[in-house]
Each structure stands twice: as C-alpha cells, then as structure tokens.
Amino acid sequence: MRNARENEGPKYENIPELVMPKRSRSKISCYILDTNAVLILLQDEPGATAVQRLISRAKSNNCRLIMSIISLGEMYYIIYERRGRIDATKALTYIESLPIEMLTAKRKVTLQAAEIKATKNLGYADSFVVACALTEDGRVVTGDPDFKKADDIIHIRWLIGRAS
C-alpha cells in the first residue's frame, strides 16, 4: 500500500531560491545604462529626458536601472579629463545618489566581456555593458552607435539622434 504523501507530487518550497532563474522572479523591465547615456543626462543633451524618465520609473520601482562599475569608472575619467577632479567627483556623487544598481566586475561578467571584446570589436567598457545586459536580461540604454556591433545579441533602447 502506498503512502498518501507519495501521491502529493514534488515539494518546490524546499528548493533554494538560487536555482530559480532571475526572469521567473520578476517581470520588471531592466535597463543597463551605458556611459554615453549617463553623460547625456549629466550634460542635459538630447536624450536626457528619456534617461530622466527611466530614473523616475526606477524610483517608483517600475523598472531596474543597472550600470557596470566599469562604466562608472569610464564616466569618472571622461569628466576628470574634460573638466577636472571636482566636477568628476560631483558627477560621481550625483550618479551614486540615483536608484542605479552597480554591477561589479565579477569573474563571470569579466570573462564574458572579454569574449564580447574579442568577437564584436567593441571597446572594453562597452563590452562590459553588453555583458551586463546579457547577465541581467536587460536593454542597453545608449546613443553610442558602436553598440550596433552587438545588436544581434542584445536589445538596445536608443537615445534620440545618437544611433546614426
């Protein structure tokens, strides 16, 4: 005679959350900010309004905004070269105050970025953005036309007037 418990089927509540794919946990949209998008925002260039809308959505928990820590460093050095350390530090403080998750350069993402760099002929920082998009199932936000080289493997949210 079979035990009644044997007929109940598998018990899923005991499976650790780590085995569940990220996509099944949440249907919220995810956007990966490229350095270009952040600079557009900071300099209030065409396309800044679209980035501001995404920030507002993230503040309301209606989307996730992610930035690679490599892109944060790229933003910092670009502003440092153009306008000096004080402005670079102000920009850094401002960006870090926004609802943007910083994705660190862990081994998996780093090696994926290296493969993207080798196969797509993108800059190294841009390769990290693509790797972040693949890892987080997100859409890259940029106006940088170099990302056309990777549009076969990622989705891109082009900022106005920057994709040509």
Image: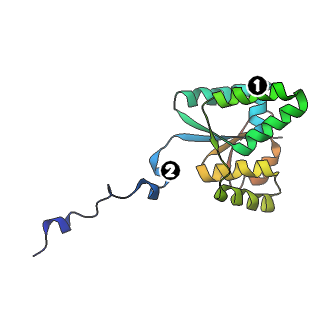
Which residue is pictured at 50% across the width and 51% down the height? Answer: 22
Q: Is residue 84 above or below residue 145?
A: above
Q: Is residue 139 left or right of residue 44?
A: left
**Point 66% across, 49% down: residue:** 132
Amino acid at circle 2: Arg
Q: Quadrant of residue 48?
A: top right
In the current view of this chain or complex, which residue is farthest to the bottom?
1
Which SS class for mark 1? helix
Q: Closer to the camera, 52 or 12?
A: 12
Q: Does residue 5 appear left or right of residue 65 in this picture?
A: left
Query: Label for residue 138?
Result: none
Q: Position of residue 7 (x, y in %)?
A: 19, 67
Residue 99 visible? The answer is yes
| Residue 152 point in image, percent of width and height | 71, 55
Residue kind at label 1, given as amino acid type: Lys
Q: Nearer the viewer, residue 73 or 153?
A: 73
Q: Tell me which residue sits at (68%, 53%) in the image.
A: 131
Judge whether 104 appears above or below 98 on screen: below
Residue labelled with disc 1: 90
The percent coordinates of residue 3 (x first, y second) are 13, 70
Q: Is residue 160 visible?
A: no
Q: Which residue is mark 2?
A: 23
Question: Residues at badges 1 and 2 in contact (C-beta under 8 Å)?
Answer: no
Q: Residues within 10 Å of mark 1 (few under 14, many from 20)?
A: few
The C terminus is located in which quarter? top right
Q: Is residue 92 above or below residue 140?
A: above
What kind of element bears circle 2?
Answer: helix
Q: Say which residue appears at 85% left-offset and 36% top-offset.
A: 78
Disc 1 versus disc 2: distance between alpha carbons? 35 Å
Image side of residue 33 versus residue 6, left or right: right
Q: Is residue 96 above or below residue 122?
A: above
